[in-house]
């Protein structure tokens, strides 16, 4: 999709990529958008239009990542967005995958040990993800906010050369998807199997986008602040 | 095709971008646009699978391309054929260009692809040791092979199974009775 701007219609964005519903939700915008444009919705919900369009563009276009523009936003905005993302994982995405998995396993006619093991592997990924969320929320984010307060008025330039690194959580989610896609065998309800894969896919997409913001925006800011 | 590597060598930026985009969107292959500095930094350890190259660059570097005849494609502006190198006419229609490229991608490279996706006996042994928590050095000692061989087994295991992480491999091993 071409880049969206303040004049783009919310309905068109959602129809083009329904997974944006979850991003809009983090900004307090729910379905039933009428024919509102981004600028209208931002005014109504008191959202920074530039921040909103930048986040949506990075979400929709995988190859688009305006690092300089994102670094220019206030740290609290970025942290606030990441916090909302984490809430979304805890309240929606993880329970959703668990529900689908439980349903799939309960509807599997014979005991399929493959599925039970995959479910266990997902539990491991979940524990790791929740641990990261907990650590970010209780240690990392408050630390950045504190350092930023100390540095008030003399904000250092963020270190921009932070590279993407292989995130172990992303790697495990990929493994889990490949396990289901390539190695699932035995009896199982095909429809519910599809639901599990789709639910994990939406987590994968979101975490990938979230990690780009976390690792390439917040990490450089945090490093610059603690180097002071 | 994600490990397939294509190099595009042309001074025409739009031609290069156009080709790269076809590789990316139609074939899911990463193509890299290079310039004349490419030959200075060339390393045979990362030998690409295919070169798409302009006549000028090809002629100026014949010593490089002649031994790589089987994987070099000459970019031409008309449909003249060349005795030494296969050609791709850049003025052809998009669908003709895609058809031509597709013959280059499927021909002559089978030997580099993994022919089977079931694990060999040796790979199963390596997987069993990975799943029981051994590090590469210990696996090498136990099987009496070099660390490089262990790494190459691990690479093949991951390519065949689509599983990279140690815990993912461990779960796979459990599912298949390997441990």
Image (cartoon, rainbow, N blue to C red):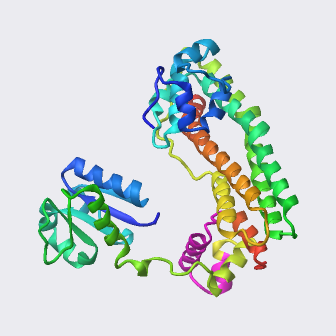
* Residue closest to the eye, A115 or B97: B97
Within the image, what quadrant is residue B35 found in? bottom left
Q: Which residue occupies 18% across, 56% down?
A: B91
- The quadrant in which the C terminus of chain B is found is bottom right
Residue A57 visible? The answer is yes
Residue B5 sits above or below residue A204 on the image: below
Q: Which residue occupies 64% across, 48% down?
A: A204
Q: Which residue occupies 61% across, 46% down?
A: A205
First to last magenta residue range: B138-165
Q: Main secondary structure of the magenta part?
A: helix
State left or right for residue B123 relative to residue B3. Answer: right
Residue B113 % position (x, y): 46, 76
* Residue closest to the eye, A18 or B20: A18
Q: Which residue occupies 82% across, 49% down?
A: A99
Residue B148 colored in magenta in the image: yes
Residue A108 % position (x, y): 84, 64
Residue B178 sits above or below residue A85 on the image: below
State left or right for residue A215 relative to residue A123. Answer: left
Residue A151 % position (x, y): 59, 19
Residue A89 sits above or below residue A173 on the image: above
* Residue closest to the eye, A112 or A226: A112
Residue B43 colored in magenta in the image: no
Residue A136 % position (x, y): 71, 36
Say how many tags the image has.
0
């Amino acid at each position: 999709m071409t880049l969206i701007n303040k004049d783009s219609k919310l309905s068109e964005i959602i129809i083009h990529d329904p997974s944006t519903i979850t991003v809009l939700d983090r900004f307090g915008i729910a379905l039933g958008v009428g024919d509102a444009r981004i600028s209208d919705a931002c005014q109504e919900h008191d959202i920074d239009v530039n921040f909103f369009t930048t986040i949506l563009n990075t979400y929709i276009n995988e190859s688009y990542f305006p690092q300089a523009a994102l670094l220019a936003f206030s740290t609290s905005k970025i942290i606030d967005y990441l916090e909302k993302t984490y809430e979304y994982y805890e309240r929606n995405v993880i329970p959703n995958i668990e529900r689908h998995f439980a349903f799939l396993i309960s509807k599997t006619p014979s005991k399929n040990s493959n599925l039970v093991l995959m479910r266990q592997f997902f539990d491991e990924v979940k524990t790791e993800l929740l641990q990261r969320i907990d650590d970010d929320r209780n240690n990392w984010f408050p630390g950045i906010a504190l350092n930023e307060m100390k540095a008030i008025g003399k904000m250092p330039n963020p270190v921009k050369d932070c590279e993407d690194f292989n995130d172990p959580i992303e790697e495990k989610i990929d493994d889990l998807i490949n396990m289901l896609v390539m190695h699932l065998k035995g009896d199982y309800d095909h429809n519910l199997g599809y639901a599990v894969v789709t639910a994990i896919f939406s987590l994968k997409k979101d975490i990938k986008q979230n990690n780009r913001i976390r690792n390439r925006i917040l990490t450089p800011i945090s490093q610059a602040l603690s180097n002071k | 095709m994600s490990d397939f590597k294509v190099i595009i060598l042309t001074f025409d930026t739009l031609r290069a971008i156009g080709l790269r985009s076809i590789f990316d969107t139609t074939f899911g292959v990463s193509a890299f646009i290079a310039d004349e500095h490419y030959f200075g930094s060339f390393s045979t350890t990362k030998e690409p699978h295919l070169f798409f190259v302009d006549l000028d660059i090809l002629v100026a570097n014949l010593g490089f391309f002649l031994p790589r005849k089987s994987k070099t494609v000459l970019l031409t502006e008309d449909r003249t054929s060349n005795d030494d190198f296969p050609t791709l006419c850049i003025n052809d229609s998009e669908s003709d260009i895609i058809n031509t490229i597709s013959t280059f991608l499927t021909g002559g490279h089978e030997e580099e692809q993994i022919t089977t996706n079931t694990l060999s006996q040796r790979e199963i042994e390596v997987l069993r040791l990975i799943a029981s928590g051994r590090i590469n050095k210990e696996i090498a000692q136990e099987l009496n092979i070099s660390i490089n061989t262990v790494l190459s087994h691990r690479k093949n295991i991951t390519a065949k199974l689509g599983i990279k992480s140690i815990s993912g491999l461990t779960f796979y091993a459990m599912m298949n009775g390997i441990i």
